[in-house]
Structure formats: C-alpha cells, structure tokens
Image: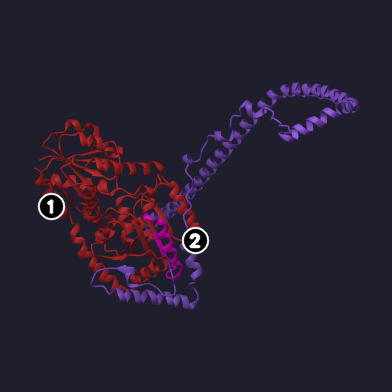
Chain colours: A purple, B red
Amino acid sequence: MSEIKDGCSEDFISTCKEINVEEIIDSIKKKIKEKKEIGILKQKDIDEINDMELLPLPDFLEIPNVYEPHLYPEHKMEDFEPFHLDLEKEAGIAKKILGKIRKMVYPLTRFMIRPFLNDLKNLEVELHNQNKEEIHRLKQLVPIVFQSKEYIKLLHNSMNNMIVELSKLKIEEELLKTKIKVMEDKVEFLENRERAVEKKLFKE
Amino acid sequence: MIIHQFLTSYSYGDAIGNEAFEIRNYLRENGIESEIFSLFYHPKYSNQIINYLEYDKFSHKDNIIIFHFSIGSPVTKKFLRMPDKKVIIYHNITPYNFFLDYHRVLAKDCYKGRVELKNFVNKIDLALGDSKYNEKELKEMGFKNTGILPLVMDFKKFDGKVDPVINELFNDGKNNLIFVGRVIPNKKIEDIIKIFFVYQKYFDENSRLFIVGEYRGFERYLSSLYSLKSKLEVKNVHFTGHVPENELISYFKLSNLYLHMSEHEGFCAPIPESYYLNIPVVAFNAGAVKETMNNGGVLINKKDFIQTAALLDHIIKDLHLRKKILKSQQESLKKYFKNKTGKILLDYVRNLT
C-alpha cells in the first residue's frame, strides 16, 4: 500500500477549488522525506502496519458439534467373505499332450506319491479342524469387536465435543478478557472523572 | 394531511432514529399530525413511539406513511399491507459481507433487507434516497418515482451545554482526533487506529483518539480492535461507548480533527455535524461520503496510512489551511439545514396528495 519512495500523487486527496491540493501534497511529501532522512521512518515498519490484519474470533455457531458420520462407514458382511483362488489349468494342445503322458505314467506316480497323498489328506483334516476352532474363536470375538467399535465412536465423539467445548471456552475467555479491558478503561475513566468532579467542586 | 413514520428500531443517538424524530417535529410544527411507529424501541421512549402493530387503528387511505428502510424486518410486510399512500426513505443497507466474520444474524438481516427492498418496486408511491448514491441504487432496482431527501437534521442540539467533567478531563493541550459512529466492521475502525498509530509515532506523541459510539452487540469486533491496539502498543485510544448528547458535544468540541475511514456509507451524519461544530473533516471516499462532504473538508481517495497521518499533521499544524477547510465546510453545511431539508420533504409529500 504505502511506498515511502515516491510519496503521494495528486489524486490521493480532493477538496474544494479554493484549497491548493498541490501545496498539501508537497507538504506531505516533505514531511515523509524528513522522517525518512532522519531514519525514524522505515519501509519495513510501514509494511508491517499495512500487513497487520484484524483477527476475528470465531463464531460459536461456526464450531460444529456433531461428529462427521462419514468417518464411520457401515461395513457390509460381503466385505468379509474369503477371496477365491483360481488355479492355473492347462488348455488346448498342452492339456491333451500332458493328459496322455499322465495316463502313461499313472501307475508309477500312484505307487510313488501315495504316502505324500496320505500326508496331505491328514494335513487337510488337521487344518480343517484348526480352521473350525479359529472360526469358532473369531465368532466369539465379533461382539467384542463391535462393542469396541462403538467405544471408539463414543471416544471420538467425546474428544470432538471436548475440543468444541474448549474452543468455545477459549472464545469466551477472549471475550471476557476484552470485557475486563473495557471495564478497566471505564474504571480508570471513572476514577479520573471522580477526581475532575472533585476538583471542579472544590474550585467552585 | 396526516403523515406517520415506520421504523425498524428507534434508539437514541442513531442517525435514522434522530431523523424520524426531526421529521415528526418538523411536520408537527407545520400543523401536520404525525406519529412514529417502530418494531424495537427503548422503554424510555414508550411515550413517544408506538408499536408498529398498532398502526391499524391509525391507518387511512388518505394518510401518508414514510418507512425508513435500512434493514430487513417484519415491518416491511405490515407497511406493504396498509392502504395508506406509501413513501420509503432508503438509508442504504450495509453489504452483508462486512458482518460475516462478526455478526451472522446481522449479516442475514442485511442480506434479507436487499431482497425485501425489491418487494417495494411498483408497490409504493415514492422512493426517496438520502443521497444520490442511494437514489441511484433505487433506480437500478426498478423504482420509477424516486427523489433525494438529505438527512433531516437539527444542529441546534449541538448548541447545548458541554459536559464540564469531560472538558476538565481531556482539555489538557493534547491534539485530539475523533471518530463518531457505531463500532462495526464497515466503519473500518482498524484503519483509524493504524493511521492514529502512525500519526502518534511519527508526528505527534502528544495526541489522543476518541472513538465515540456504541459497541454492544459487536464484542468480537471490539475484541479484535483491542488486540490490534495492544499489538501496536498505541496509547491514548479511548472507546467511549454510547454517550449522552452533552458528552458527545464535549468530545466533538475537544477535537482538532474528524477522521472517517468507513468503506460503506449511505449518508454519514457525523460529517455535517462536524462541519457545524467547526472541526475539519478528513474522510475516505466510499459510498455516499463524497456527496455528503459536498466539496467541504478533505476527501481521501486512496487508503495510505503514512500519507494520511502526514496529511492530518499538516491540517492540524497549518492554521491557514485549517481556516480554508473550515470555510469550505461552512459553505457545504448550508445544504443540510433543517428548513431546507424539511421543505424538500414537504414538497415531495404535497405532490402525492
């Protein structure tokens, strides 16, 4: 906004015809130049004042007191379904050739792989049983998880409300501080007034 | 002829309320029956103001009702439903965006006010603006029968006694600057404080600033102003709050210069008041200020704190220039004398009958 260097132009002010605007502008320029030369007036100070903005206290109504529901999306049961694993299978000529080779070596592989097959079957049974136990345990945990979810929601809400209330209290505190300052000014003014009244009365 | 007036609120010290009061007195002096009807008014004035809902008892198609319009309110509906001849005096509505950060309800009322104003088009007999600036807005909105009625003011009240205690307190040789008006955001009181800070720091340590006007309802704005005041460490800034008439006269008479940096004005009554009390006026060119200045005082076209502070110093110290400014103000003031503005009003209403 302010530039000390060039001072003001004639369109800075306007007044009646009888008053010489140029003279006023010259005087303003002179005054600013003098202050600048002495070193009292610095561009930095002026810029600081220009940039100084009023910081309004937020309005109570602007502080939301409802926790945003989008932070808690409702999960559907499908979201928890196990995913499918697609096994890679041969197709076309490769399938035919491999099928023929398998047929030829089948008696041999049956004899060789049998023990592993049995092991695999036993492992499958064992895993199935374990899985059953885990599912049973998880089912027992589901209500606890839902309960915890509700607790977290409640916790978030109470934290949000606490922040809202603290913000309100801070605004209230700032307003009260201003009121105290106003009252201090008024008390000081009234004290001075009292003295002035006394002075006036005693004079008369 | 019977002429009544409608108001949204009547409070002491308010320019619109004062005008309504002066119009009523002027009409009565001229043998015209006149009452004021308002939505809000201080109980102190219950013997002078009537609740607007009681107007049905007074209503007649030959009567004229003048509505002082400056904000949205339920009075508009009542006014439009009446069979009387209708006149509005448009005092302008402060753009709502000034209040967004400080007073949501008022921002809403100001927004509503502009919407309500459109409802008057083609439903009233005459639309008056208290300045060309206001009349232009009315024309742009589609009002056909328009006119200008400068604020009806009685300067005699400024001939009254000063408060001796205020005089005793502040008549100490300091140079005093004054601003009169409500402490609300569009008045840009922060700019006044900044200019005063520069003036006090670089030109006159021995100076004081009076900010005379109501701040209740705008505590958050006042709080910001206090923060700015302490940030700048500026001394001798006095927020007087709402003051009685004799104290206002004292503050005016103690002051060396009237400074106004508002960014929206529909008229600006303190300017002619300062003219009357022989206080040089320096005001920022916004809204109807230039028109109200009427070639008197000094108008600032660009907000520049350092240059404005230097200008204030020049006006206060150069007695020759001061005299010239005061002379120009006295010439400009003639336009606002009650006998002139009152006559303009009578001419308008006589044309309606």
Q: Main secondary structure of the magenta part?
A: helix
Residue under numbered circle 2: B232
Whether discs 1 and 2 lie on one chain: the answer is yes
Callout 1: few (<14), some (14-19), or many (20+) C-alpha neighbours within 10 Å? some
Horizontal relation, residue A165 to residue B300: left or right: right
- Residue visible at 41% across and 59% down? B191
Q: Chain of mark 2?
A: B
- Quadrant in which residue B67 is drawn: top left
- What is the secondary structure assignment of the residue under circle 2? helix
Instruction: Tell me which segment is drawn in magenta.
Output: B187-209
Q: Is residue B206 magenta?
A: yes
How far from the left and from the top, in percent, is residue A186?
A: 44, 51
Q: Please determine whether, in this image, residue B240 is positioned above or below residue A173.
A: below
Side of B196 relative to A123 (left or right): left
Tell me the number on the disc at residue B343: 1
Mark 2 is surrounded, within 10 Å at the Cα level, by few (under 14), some (14 to 19) or many (20 or more) other residues, namely: some
Query: How many marks overall?
Result: 2
Indicate whether residue A203 is drawn in magenta: no
Label 1 to label 2: alpha-carbon separation = 49 Å
Residue B267 left/right relative to A108: left
Secondary structure state at the residue bearing disc 1: helix
Q: Is residue B46 visible?
A: no
Res. A107 visible in picture: yes
Q: Position of residue B103 (x, y in %)?
A: 41, 44
**Residue type for callout 1:** Lys
Q: Amino acid at mark 2?
A: Leu
